[in-house]
Amino acid sequence: MTIDAWLRAAAARLNTESARLDAELLLTHVLGLTRAALYARLRDELDADAQAKVDALLVRRVRGEPIAYITGLREFWFMPLKVTPAVLVPRPETEVLVEQALLRLPTDRDLTLIDLGTGSGAIALALAKERPRAIVHAVDASEAALAVAEENAKRLGLTNLRFVLGHWFWGIPGEWERSLESDLRFDLVASNPPYVAGDDPHLLQGDLRFEPRMALTPEGDGLSAIREISHDARARLKPGGWLLFEHGHDQGPAVRHILERDGYTNVETLRDMEDRDRVTVGRWNVVSGSFEAEDSGRES
Ligand code: GLN
């Protein structure tokens, strides 16, 4: 069978929007080729060994497993990241959060940043890469997820990160040596927390079935993690520091309400590339209980 014939047959078997691309990604993974190189070899024979391997991967994809779990790799912010089923697959819309964070982070001074629920490390690694003078704290409650994030930092040669086992800002009993120092204050708190409502039918469909439920949903209305982080970040942000959340496309008004009620200023929702509400930001201008006069410097 030729490479071309295998790709056509595989695409026909996959009942997904991205069938052809998925087939190409599986085959490039097995053959160790780029897609361009694969295209140059469409008429070559696929050897029996490679075909057996890629057929086995195709079966996993037909059952719905995300491509990133099958290949163990996903690109985010121009960085190849290792992913395992212990972490959410990084999504392109999360790059909106990174862009918005960078707009608010000066390049000319030391910064202390934190990514809550880091998973593969996507957000933390992007910030660490783009702001070499920052120390980025990457927090996760999952030991397995944190190990993936740490490995990604190592592979990328990024050393300006600290890995913290914790539930948001809080330590996990018995793990105090790996928890956050209580006197740390941040210039920016970023989080792509679990935000899908517990009864959302999407949790039982498609790729989401294979992802860690604790990374997707806090159960209930989907907003409890955002409420908790918004509340607790107030004691952790430096005056003028920023809080940024990724959230569901229909959660913009609810998240703005939470931030405004908690006393953040400059609250605003940004849209993703599909023009859906995706990221809400707020600024902590409170100094010892009173609002500081707003400086005009860092509006986006
Ligand atoms: N964006 C994901 C989805 O709905 C959810 C990610 C999350 O809960 N943080 O597919």
Image: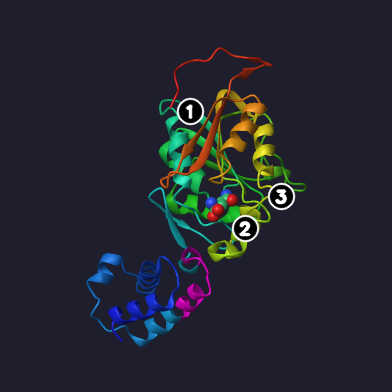
Q: Give amino acid for label 2.
A: Ala
Q: Give amino acid for label 1.
A: Asp
* Range drawn in magenta: 56-69
CB of mark 2 within 8 Å of CB of mark 3?
no
Closer mark to the observer between disc 2 and disc 3: 3
Asked if 46 appears above or below 280 in the picture, the reply is below
Q: What residue appears at the point 64 percent right and 24 percent down from the top-left corner?
A: 263
Mark 2, Cα crowd under 10 Å, few <14 / some 14-19 / many 20+, is some
Numbered disc total: 3
Overall secondary structure of the magenta section: helix
- Residue 220's mark? 3
From the viewer's perspective, tell me whether residue 278 is left or right of residue 20: right
* Residue 184: percent from left, percent from top: 63, 30
Tell me which label, 1 or 3, sits earlier in the chain.
1
| Quadrant housing the C terminus | top left
Closer mark to the observer between disc 1 and disc 2: 2
* Residue 243: percent from left, percent from top: 57, 32
Q: Give amino acid for label 3.
A: Gly
Residue under label 2, please give it. 144
- Residue 110's mark? 1
Q: Is residue 84 magenta?
A: no
